[in-house]
Amino acid sequence: MIQFANKCGGLPARRYDDDFEMSIVTKTGDAGTTGLMYGRRVPKNHPRVEACGAIDELNAALGLARATAEFDFIRGQLFWIQKSLVDVMGEVGVLTEDLPRYAKDGYTLITPELTAKLEKLVREIEAQNVSFKGWATPGATVNSASLDVARTICRRAERRVFDLQSAGELPNAGILIFLNRLSDLLWLFARWVETKSGALEK
């Protein structure tokens, strides 16, 4: 069975299974609109789409950071964070009036527990005497640089989500808090990589 997926931020409009295939080309966006959950359509420059698009970019940047990771610790942490961002984008991509249906349908909502998991990682890394030397000039390693790129995209995603929240279009304030903690953590990840790889000593 074909399952319709959130197209917010440029995600495919449909998922595919082994029994049936459909083209990625739907032509439904040719007039400048895009689809949200539950058949809703909005302009492609709608603030909700801008927020989803920034989160989508963040997820892609984290994919690059994970692919270039030198350490299993970073690779493993980024993987679950990427999975969580799919849930973040899903909730952001739903109109406020459709959120009760979204929750009833069993989709994951962002909770304080998810943010607490990030905060726990922050405390663990801060306890490891990580060097902050050279942080203002990213590029000591490919992986730390990719983490810094992801961090800056995360900050932009925060701004786009805040726009939605300020307009009363995002009831769950925990999403903004999650992204704020994540940007801090990504900065620490980059510094951790630089310290562990000895790049700052070269």
Image (cartoon, grey):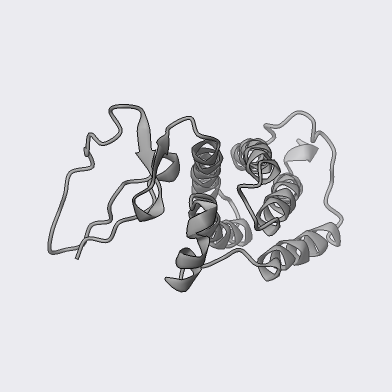
Position of 21 with respect to 16 (left or right) is left
The residue most toward the left is 19
| Quarter of the image with the N terminus in it | bottom left
- Name which quarter of the figure residue 11 lies in: top left
- Name which quarter of the figure residue 75 lies in: bottom right
Q: Residue at x 62, y 35 (%)?
A: 149
Residue 105: x %, y % from top left: 42, 71
Q: Residue at x 62, y 56 (%)?
A: 74
Residue 155: x %, y % from top left: 68, 39
In depth, the one of 1 and 194 nearer the eye is 1
User: How many numbered markers are drawn?
Assistant: 0
Residue 113: x %, y % from top left: 69, 70
Is residue 16 depicted above or below 180 in this figure? below
Q: Residue at x 26, y 36 (%)?
A: 28
The residue most toward the front is 97
In depth, the one of 60 and 108 nearer the eye is 108
In depth, the one of 64 and 114 nearer the eye is 114
Q: Residue at x 66, y 47 (%)?
A: 168
In depth, the one of 58 and 131 nearer the eye is 58
Position of 187 with respect to 96 (left or right) is right
Residue 67: x %, y % from top left: 49, 48
| Quarter of the image with the C terminus in it | top right
Position of 144 with respect to 66 (left or right) is right
Position of 147 with respect to 191 (left or right) is left
Is residue 138 depicted above or below 111 in this figure? above
Is residue 45 depicted above or below 173 in this figure? above
